[in-house]
Amino acid sequence: MSTIKNIVYIALYTLFIIVTILLVKDFMHTKKSTIKPGTVIILNGPSSVGKSSIIKALQAKQTSPWLSIGIDNFFVGVIPPKFYLEPKPEHFAVMQGVASVDAQGNKLFTLHVGAEGQKIIKGMHESIAAYAHAGNNVIVDYIQYEPAWHTDLQKALTDNPVLWVGVTAPLAAIEEREKKRGTSPTGHARSHYDSVHQGMAYDLMLDTEKITPEQCADKIIELLKRK
């Protein structure tokens, strides 16, 4: 008889533990769902077009923090330097920069992201979404090197309010900035200038030769108010 009681006690205790776990999980889910997701602004455009200057101007105009995320700090910035400083075949699974010239003799420097690098890009997309899910407003310095990235980013941001902003300028102006900055190889911007906006549908388009970073930020803020 005592054996039967023990079995009943164990069964009841086990049931109690299971119910408790389910209630805690439901509470945590409810608590999480009450967090208002932050807004994500994707600034997509070629290298040296002026996206970082727009981000700084926008951040300066906001009374709450807007987090800056992008290719530099969430892709290149998390990779051990040897993988992009040493042009070794064993590193090309992450990324490879290829120097060439186009039909007119202009220098090109094309970035190829390998299978390992693609995993980092996917992680960057998920990280952007995670910051927003936690209630943070995020502005992203983005370069769509491959059209497939857009699809993956859209999927990651399904549950977040997103503004898609295209940033452009004449190629000559961008290459002049590229030369002055000296942080990108000559021909980098030219290599993706014609493809970076491929397949993108924007809420706003900004030309950084025609208006200042501060004016760009004002246009984004105006758009935010209308959304």
Image (tube, grey):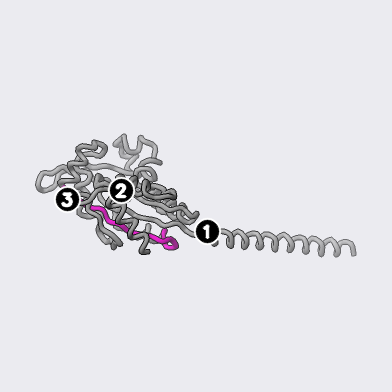
Disc assigned to residue 202: none
Which residue is label 3 attached to?
A: 170
Q: Is residue 202 magenta?
A: no
In the rendered structure, which disc, 2 or 3, sits on the residue that comes first in sequence?
2
Disc assigned to residue 54: 2
Please give the name of the residue rendered at 39% of the width and 47% of the height, measured from the top-left corner: 68
Q: Position of residue 97 (x, y in %)?
A: 26, 42
Residue 148 figure quarter? bottom left
Q: Is residue 195 left or right of residue 38?
A: left
Asked if disc 1 and disc 2 are in contact, CB closer than 8 Å, the reply is no
Give the magenta part as a residue range: 156-171
Residue type for callout 2: Ile
The kind of secondary structure element at disc 2 is helix
Residue type for callout 3: Pro
How far apart marks 1 and 3 lie (CA) works out to 42 Å
Residue type for callout 1: Ile
Please give the name of the residue rendered at 43% of the width and 60% of the height, measured from the top-left corner: 160
Give the quarter of the figure containing the C terminus: bottom left
